[in-house]
Amino acid sequence: MRHHKTLDLAPGRLVTVREMRVADVRHIFTQLSHSALARAPIQELLGERWPELLALAGDSLTLPEGETLDDLSFSELDQIGAAWWELHQDFFGRIEALVRRLGVDPKRSLSSIAPASAASSADTPASGTTAGRSS
């Protein structure tokens, strides 16, 4: 069973934050690899850009009927972020430990540490050619 927290932002305005599933994490990483967020430093992603990251979290967040993240105040986002972090701190702690073990600077972006196989084939010159003009 997925762990969850329910927050009462105001009377009748309940928010449910659910533990992410493996599918949610895969979705986030897939979206990040095709997004400008992939170029953001890891610290920034887990800091001031977390609302954008949270928007990718699938059904891990249920907002009040008819509301979106854009409708929430910063203090409400902080409450949701605190609950989300509490549910996921072990997961992100493991990622942080892995990043440290690999010696990756958290100020680097996810795209700078992606495996070489993640590069687009459109960015790779055809065999026997080089990128750029011939001289």
Image (tube, rainbow, N blue to C red):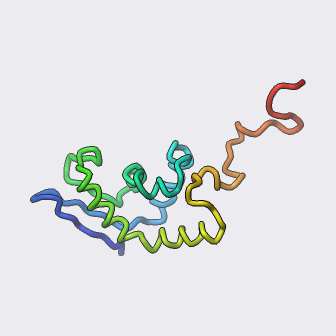
Relative to 63, is 39 above or below? above
Residue sitting at 35 percent across and 65 percent down? Answer: 84
Q: Is 38 drawn above or below residue 19 in the view shown? A: above
Locate residue 62, reporting x and y percent. 27, 57
Tell me which residue sits at (52%, 56%) in the image. Answer: 42
Residue 101 at what x, y percent from top left?
64, 71
Q: Residue at 27% across / 47% down in the picture?
A: 68
Residue at the extreme left of the image, as rendered: 11
Quadrant (top left, top right, bottom left, bottom right) of the C terminus = top right
Q: Where, quadrant-wise, is the N terminus in this rendering?
A: bottom left
Query: Residue 18 occupies which quadrant of the picture?
Result: bottom left
Q: How many marks?
A: 0
Question: For the point 40% across and 52% down, which residue is it?
Answer: 48
Coordinates of residue 26 in the picture (x, y in percent) = 51, 58
Q: Quadrant of residue 6?
A: bottom left
Q: Is residue 120 above or below residue 94?
A: above
Q: Is 26 left or right of 102, judged from the image as shown? A: left
Residue 50 horizontal/vertical position (percent): 40, 54
